[in-house]
Image (cartoon, rainbow, N blue to C red):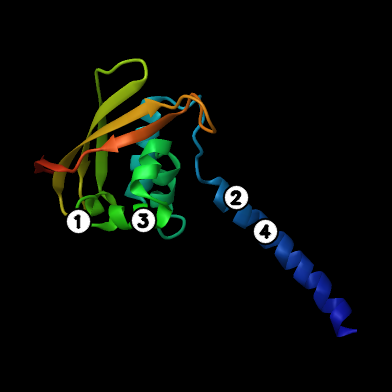
Amino acid sequence: MKIKFVLPILVMILGLLLPGLAARAADLVIPDPSIAPEEVVAIQMKALQFNDNPTPDFGIAQTWNFAHPRNRAMTGPLPRFASMLKGPGYGSMLNHASHRIVAVPGDDNRATFDVFMETSTGQVLLFNWAVELVEGGEFDNCWMTVAVSMPRLAGQGS
């Protein structure tokens, strides 16, 4: 008799939890031809700014989602990419205070941006960010990141 009572409750609880888990996975923005170059950079910067929201390293996973296939081949799988972002060169990107994206003249297949980022300690860093249009394959006609420079000190923030 108890099993008959517990089973419907379990089914009901799973029914409530599963849509939430699916929605969380759906929160990752996937590359799409409709996403403009500057939007790609903005998606990645916003994700890095709030890296651990809604889950730990969500921002890193979101950034990886927009890594160009050539870039993915160079930086390795997601765990290796995450280690690189947490290292001394790029670690300041995680949970930064603010950022500003400035377009730099480019061409039809490559767009470059200067990204000014204020760290959580108030330093302003400059990154050069490049995205390219993917030709062929799974991400055909999608803008994806091909390069991000090491940070350069660009001043002191607020």
Residue, disc 2: 23
Left/right of residue 96 with respect to residue 12 in the rendered view: left
Instruction: Say which quadrant the N terminus sits in.
Output: bottom right
| Quarter containing the C terminus | top left
The residue mark sitting in front, 3 or 4, is 3
* Position of residue 39 measured from the top left corner of the image (x, y, whole percent): 39, 30
Which residue in the protein does label 1 denote?
Answer: 88
Q: Residue at x 22, y 52 (%)?
A: 92
What whole-number distance in Å separates the C-alpha atoms at marks 4 and 2?
9 Å
Q: Which label sits in the foreground, 4 or 1?
A: 1
Mark 2 lies on a secondary structure that is helix
Q: Please, which residue is most extreme toward the top here?
A: 108
Q: Nearer the viewer, mark 1 or mark 3?
A: 3
x 36%, y 39%: residue: 71
Q: Residue at x 40, y 39 (%)?
A: 67
Numbered tag placed on residue 39 in the rendering: none
* Residue type, mark 3 in image: Arg
Kindly report which numbered mark, 2 or 3, lies closer to the viewer in this rendering: 3
Q: Is residue 140 visible?
A: yes
State the residue at coordinates (45%, 43%). Answer: 65
Quarter of the image where one finds residue 131: top left
Tell me the distance, in whole angstroms, between the alpha carbons under discs 4 and 1: 38 Å
Q: Residues within 10 Å of mark 4 (few under 14, many from 20)?
A: few
x, y (%) of residue 11? Answer: 78, 67
Q: Position of residue 151 (x, y in %)?
A: 17, 43
> The residue under label 4 is which amino acid type?
Leu
Q: CA distance from mark 1 to mark 2?
A: 33 Å
Mark 4 lies on a secondary structure that is helix
Q: Which residue is mark 3?
A: 80
- Residue 102: where, in percent of width, then height? 24, 27
- Observer-nearest residue: 66 or 119? 66
